[in-house]
């Protein structure tokens, strides 16, 4: 089923090449919620898990595997802009990775540079995937968050042989078409990104900010063709102002002058990868989708959560488990 016209989409992405997987993914989340969601942190109902557009997407009604093991799953997350710089407080989906590890998956976080440009990070991601190795019968799933999606697309373009080592890519709030905030940011913020010394986050003279430019990303997409043989999925996010953390309210309001469907850092229409099956629109802000600051009990993390990221709670364990079960289901269906 193609993605309906009421789902906003950047013109750089061909709507006809997208599939609407929102109904089935919602069924998977609902089944997991019903089976064990209440026992996990930050639990919330399926209705509040998603922000929906009318009419509601239709599912398949098929049975959902809610307890099968994740043996044979290799899951790699790809962090976003500045994540390396704050990884001592929170890193990409670490809470959710621990959950899928308990189910049997092997997991890792790609060591991309928080302030590195897409081409540089593409090489680091490629090396990490190759170093992981490919085991017979194993499914390798990349889960890039935010700028990690742009780094992943750049890797596919620069290192086409990597597709032999990847089975699926599932982006979360991906910076696919760039963010208008790149142009809205005052010069002093860009100076900080380029020059401020951070003990665990090398400077790259503003390469990351340049990579987030809408022009940079759409120019890239105009020459990019998604390789065949890799399943591609996207999860966007859009939330009402009441669900945005205090630290992102200024950027949320700035983006809302262009489109209220945004997550405080990205417009929803810019978050969808080419040739993707769209799994849904998360009802959370950009950082809450994948960065578990609220799970860190340290004093600094608690201060950051209380003062700036007060809406950071989200059931990321259910989110990542549902992603893996969706990929497994689709892979098994294709094999029949």
Image (cartoon, grey):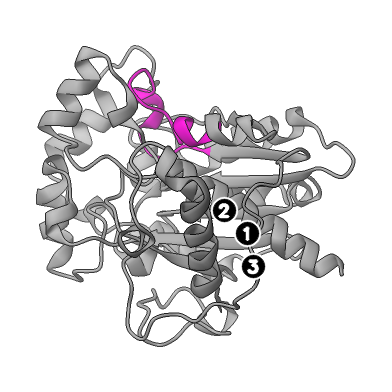
In the shown orientation, is residue 293 left or right of residue 147? left
Where disc 2 sits, the SS reads helix
Can residue 268 be seen here?
A: yes
Residue located at (41% from left, 57% from top): 216
Neighbourhood count class around disc 3 (C-alpha, 10 Å): few under 14, some 14–19, many 20 upward = few
Q: Are marks 3 and 1 in contact (CB under 8 Å)?
A: no
Task: Check disc 3 and report the residue beneath it.
Answer: 225
Spatial distance from mark 1 to mark 2, Cα to Cα? Answer: 5 Å
Neighbourhood count class around disc 1 (C-alpha, 10 Å): few under 14, some 14–19, many 20 upward = many
Determine if the magenta segment contains residue 86: yes
Residue located at (39% from left, 74% from top): 10
Residue located at (79% from left, 48% from top): 161
Where disc 3 sits, the SS reads loop
What is the span of residues highlighted in magenta in the rendered image?
78-97
Viewport quadrant of the N terminus = bottom right
Closer-to-camera residue (281/47): 47
Which comes sooner in the sequence, label 3 or label 1? 3
Which comes sooner in the sequence, label 2 or label 3? 3
In the shown orientation, is residue 39 left or right of residue 258? right
Image coordinates of residue 37 in percent, x first then y, are 45, 47
Location of residue 325 with respect to 292 vertically, above or below = below
Closer-to-camera residue (38/224): 38
Location of residue 137 with respect to 252 vertically, above or below = above
Task: Check disc 2 and report the residue beneath it.
Answer: 323
Neighbourhood count class around disc 2 (C-alpha, 10 Å): few under 14, some 14–19, many 20 upward = many
Where disc 1 sits, the SS reads helix
In the shown orientation, is residue 42 left or right of residue 244? right
Task: Check disc 1 and report the residue beneath it.
Answer: 326
Spatial distance from mark 3 to mark 1, Cα to Cα? Answer: 24 Å
Image coordinates of residue 152 in percent, x first then y, are 57, 48
Residue 4: mark: none
Determine if the magenta segment contains residue 93: yes
């Amino acid at each position: 089923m193609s993605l309906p016209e009421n789902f906003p989409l950047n013109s750089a992405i061909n709507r006809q090449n997208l599939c609407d997987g929102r109904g089935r993914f919602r069924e998977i989340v609902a089944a997991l919620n019903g089976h064990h969601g209440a026992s996990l942190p930050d639990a919330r109902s399926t209705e509040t898990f998603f922000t929906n557009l009318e009419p509601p997407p239709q599912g398949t009604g098929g049975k959902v595997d809610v307890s099968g093991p994740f043996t044979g799953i290799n899951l790699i997350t790809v962090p976003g802009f500045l994540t390396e710089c704050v990884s001592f407080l929170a890193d990409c989906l670490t809470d959710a990775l621990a959950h899928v590890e308990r189910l049997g998956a092997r997991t890792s976080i790609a060591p991309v540079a928080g302030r590195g440009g897409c081409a540089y990070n593409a090489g680091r991601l490629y090396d990490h995937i190759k170093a992981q190795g490919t085991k017979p019968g194993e499914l390798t799933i990349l889960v890039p968050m935010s700028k990690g999606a742009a780094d992943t697309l750049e890797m596919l373009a620069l290192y086409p042989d990597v597709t032999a080592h990847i089975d699926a890519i599932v982006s979360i709030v991906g910076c696919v078409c760039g963010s208008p905030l790149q142009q809205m940011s005052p010069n002093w913020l860009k100076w900080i990104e380029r020059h401020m010394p951070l003990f665990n986050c090398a400077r790259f003279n503003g390469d990351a900010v340049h990579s987030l430019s809408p022009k940079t990303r759409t120019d890239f997409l105009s020459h990019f063709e998604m390789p065949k043989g890799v399943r591609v999925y996207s999860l966007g996010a859009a939330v009402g102002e009441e669900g945005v953390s205090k630290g992102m309210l200024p950027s949320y309001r700035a983006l809302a002058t262009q489109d209220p469907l945004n997550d405080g850092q990205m417009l929803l229409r810019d978050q969808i990868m080419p040739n993707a099956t769209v799994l849904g629109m998360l009802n959370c802000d950009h950082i809450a989708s994948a960065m578990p600051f609220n799970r860190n009990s340290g004093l600094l993390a608690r201060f950051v959560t209380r003062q700036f990221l007060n809406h950071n709670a989200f059931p990321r364990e259910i989110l990542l488990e549902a992603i893996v079960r969706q990929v497994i289901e689709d892979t098994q269906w294709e094999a029949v």
